[in-house]
Image: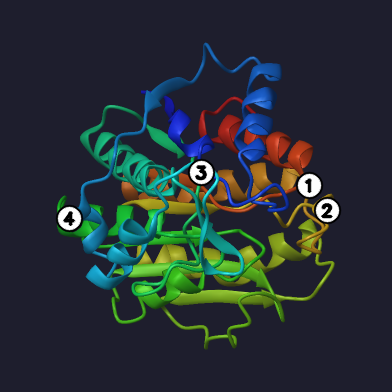
Amino acid sequence: MNTAIYSHPDCSKHEMGDWHPESPQRLQAIEDQLILARLDGLIERREAPLADLADIARNHSQGAIALVRDHTPTQPGEYYPIDPDTIMNCHTWRAALRAAGAAVAATDAVIRGEIANAFCLVRPPGHHATPGTPMGFCFFNNIAIAARRALEVHGLERVAVVDFDVHHGNGTAESFAADPRVLMASFYRHPFYPYTEPEPIDRHFVNVPVRVAADGEEIRQLVREYWLPALHAHRPQMVFISAGFDAHREDDMGGLALVEADYAWLTREVMEVARLYGNGRIVSSLEGGYALSALGRSVVAHVKALAGLD
């Protein structure tokens, strides 16, 4: 079995204005680096389908779904702001369905054993979208939707969500706050957007705040101290990754100091947990990362690790 990348051209049509850092150029920068890395013959490519609304509704209220569906502009050049940073154009609805659909389709394929693991090369991102509110560049929580698919449709009993974006995945945390089947493990810069207060670290929530300028060694130490004991105790039958790359030292928005080797190391550590308890099953989906060259290089490091090519 091999690694698959799920993507679709619709994800590049969603845009929020020339000034916005969450731009279609992010996907092109990643594609350019994948070409430079000569991975095309080694990674399977799959088209992201449109998500079924029933899958989205497992994690999002009807009001949240309607807010995106019913306010998507109908004409090119029109925009509708949900908040100052989360803006829709006429392609946003389909792009959001593709992003969620990629995560769902990847989950199905990995559980069925068609592929070993998958990376969803999609936008808009998802981990800030709460069950009731799109926010923070995010409309639907792609990883939370996929995790619920694994639990509710495929009958898995325990899954883990690992989030290495520089921002706290508040939407994911809210989605699974009352669900002990799901372990969430993350680090995030604090204080920083979305300005949530740190949660107590317990058996199911291992979300660790870090200082500005934290580097790879500091992150590796917290993974060893906090994430890995919790992950081994939880014994997840599948792992989902919110793969944000805005903690890279070249990403001025993030203010942390990771490099490509740190993302490869994080990926390998998560893969070992998935190998031990989940037959290697992993679905990863793109979140943040706004320094285009660093984003592309970091995704290559992540995908090569998933495919065992690093």
Task: State which tag comes first along the sequence, 2 or 4.
Answer: 4
In space, the residues marked 1 and 2 are separated at their CA atoms by: 6 Å
| Residue 1 spot, x, y in % from top left | 36, 23
The answer to whether marks 3 and 2 mark residues whose Cβ atoms lie closer than 8 Å is: no
Q: What amino acid type should be assigned to the residue bearing mark 2? A: Arg
The answer to whether marks 1 and 2 mark residues whose Cβ atoms lie closer than 8 Å is: yes
Q: Nearer the viewer, mark 2 or mark 4?
A: 4
* Residue under the image location 62 percent in, 64 percent down: 223
Vertical side of 135 occupied by 301: above or below? above
| Residue 77 spot, x, y in % from top left | 55, 45
Q: What amino acid type should be assigned to the residue bearing mark 3? A: His
The count of marks equals: 4
Q: Nearer the viewer, mark 1 or mark 3?
A: 3
- Tag 2 residue: 249
In space, the residues marked 4 and 3 are separated at their CA atoms by: 22 Å
In space, the residues marked 4 and 1 are separated at their CA atoms by: 38 Å
Task: State which tag comes first along the sequence, 1 or 3.
Answer: 3
In space, the residues marked 1 and 3 are separated at their CA atoms by: 28 Å
For the question of whether residue 190 can be seen, the reply is yes
* Residue 259 - label: 1
- Tag 3 residue: 14
**Where, quadrant-wise, is the C terminus in this rendering?**
top right
Vertical side of 19 occupied by 230: above or below? below
Q: What amino acid type should be assigned to the residue bearing mark 1? A: Val
